[in-house]
Amino acid sequence: MIDRDPGEVTIAGRRLARLDFSGAGIYRALFTTEIRCHLLSFVVTAPDPALREKLVLGLAGMTFVGDIGFPVCRKDYASEGNVTRRVDPPGGGAYARVAVRILVGADGRVRHIHVIRAAPALKSGIEEALTQWLFKPYEANGTAIPIETGVMFDLKPAAGAPQKAR
């Protein structure tokens, strides 16, 4: 059951969406915010609403790590015509949709690859392909800087791969 209308709160100087709900004798407060292209969500859980509120008030002392020292996060940079050399990963044994986070250096080369979830063979193929990608360098104030972005691969079965019966 929703205990109060969804709203916005400020905790540690950051705006978060809040939703309070309960069921089966457990009271929850769900908080969500965006940090550097990522959604951060956490839930405070208690056996009664008064304790839930006391726990929520305790969040005031929390701090969030800022963007200092991290590359700029640019959503969809890889799909906006900024790839100057692209090598497609091989298909797999079945259709797969795979999300990947990458760090692109100031020179436009892929410096770090994080495949969110994939079978080992798919992961290896994606990593091998992405190491060959080249991007237009991202500029801020006329200077090329590193960035973080994401890529979504929709991989089809490899040619000649056995298909599951439907």
Image (tube, rainbow, N blue to C red):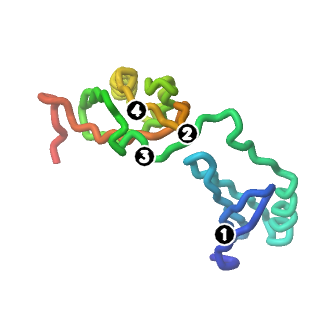
- Residue at mark 1 to residue at mark 4: CA–CA distance: 41 Å
- Residue at mark 3 to residue at mark 4: CA–CA distance: 13 Å
Which of the two discs, 3 and 1, labels the residue nearer the N terminus? 1
Residue lying at 39% horizontally and 21% vertically, measured from the top left: 131
Residue 140: mark in rendering: 2
Looking at the image, how many numbered discs can be counted on the residues? 4
Residue lying at 36% horizontally and 43% vertically, measured from the top left: 79
Which of the two discs, 2 and 3, labels the residue nearer the N terminus? 3
> Which mark is in front, 1 or 4?
4
Q: Quadrant of the N terminus?
A: bottom right
Return the residue nearer the eye: 129 or 20: 129
Residue under label 4, please give it.
136
Q: Position of residue 90 (x, y in %)?
A: 25, 27
Q: Position of residue 140 (x, y in %)?
A: 55, 39
Q: Position of residue 80 (x, y in %)?
A: 36, 45
Residue 115: mark in rendering: none
Q: Are marks 4 and 2 in contact (CB under 8 Å)?
A: no
Amino acid type, label 1? Leu
Amino acid type, label 4? Lys
Q: Categorize mark 1 by other alpha carbons within 10 Å: few (<14), some (14-19), many (20+).
A: some
Which of the two discs, 1 and 4, labels the residue nearer the N terminus? 1
Q: Position of residue 149 (x, y in %)?
A: 48, 39
Q: Secondary structure at mark 2?
A: strand
- Residue at mark 2 to residue at mark 1: CA–CA distance: 37 Å
Extreme-left residue of the structure: 160
Residue 76: mark in rendering: 3
Q: Is residue 70 left or right of residue 61?
A: left
Q: Are marks 2 and 3 in contact (CB under 8 Å)?
A: no
